[in-house]
Amino acid sequence: MSDEHTMEMNSASSPYGQQLRHLISAGFQAMLTTTAEPFRVMEIVKALANDLEYQYITWDVARGLWTNISQNEETIVNPFHNEDEPFKFCNPNAALDVIPTIGEIQRMPENAIIVFQNFEPYWEEPAVRQRFEHLCQEHLLVCSAYKRPIVFLQHSEFMHRAVKPYIR
């Protein structure tokens, strides 16, 4: 495979990148992607976020919410990291709760694509499921003021039947 073909497959113009672009443009709030190559998919999502001028944010149970925002040429900060509570956003409910924040306490950028990795175990938790359902039902992920769609990146297609209607 040529370097040019490899770059195409890992870019926002790849078939997956184009499909995701259409879903986000259509206003879908959450998408499920199953893959055995999560880092490759994450590179495509990151490239798409860059193309759309969205912030790229990831979540996993070990690091919580994570992004790098340049404040100036020398400083890169993660607005979700708090020295007093370094693992606060490792909790999936805390991570979901911060997505619709606005105003003075806003930690989220106006537009962002948020990748939740390996979320399968959390679909069984009623509080997590219900919080996600509320976010979707109340249009708190994608609305006229901001767009913060979630991409669930998992190794399997497992999700609780209650959340299936909200995920493409």
Image (cartoon, rainbow, N blue to C red):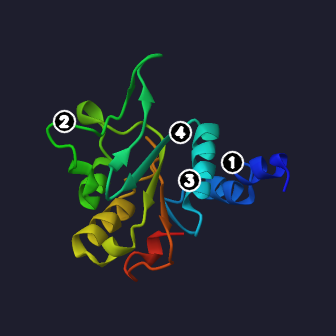
Observer-side mark, 2 or 1, equals 2
- For the residues labelled 1 and 4, the Cα–Cα distance comes to 13 Å
- The amino acid at mark 1 is Ala
* Residue pointed to by mark 3: 42
Of marks 2 and 1, which one's residue comes earlier in the chain? 1
* Residue pointed to by mark 4: 54
- The amino acid at mark 2 is Glu
* Residue pointed to by mark 2: 83
Quadrant of the rendering where the C terminus is positioned: bottom right
* Residue pointed to by mark 1: 12
Query: Are the residues tagged 2 and 1 within 8 Å (C-beta)?
Result: no
In this picture, residue 33 sits left or right of residue 161? right
- For the residues labelled 2 and 4, the Cα–Cα distance comes to 26 Å
- The amino acid at mark 3 is Met
Quadrant of the rendering where the N terminus is positioned: bottom right
Q: What residue appears at the point 34 percent right and 74 percent down from the top-left corner? A: 121
Q: Identify the disc placed on residue 115.
A: none
Observer-side mark, 4 or 3, equals 3
Observer-side mark, 1 or 4, equals 1
- For the residues labelled 3 and 1, the Cα–Cα distance comes to 11 Å
Of marks 2 and 4, which one's residue comes earlier in the chain? 4
Image coordinates for residue 33, horizontal then vertical, percent: 56, 67
- Of residues 35 and 92, the one nearer the viewer is 35
Under circle 3, the secondary element is helix
- For the residues labelled 2 and 1, the Cα–Cα distance comes to 35 Å
Image coordinates for residue 59, horizontal then vertical, percent: 38, 53
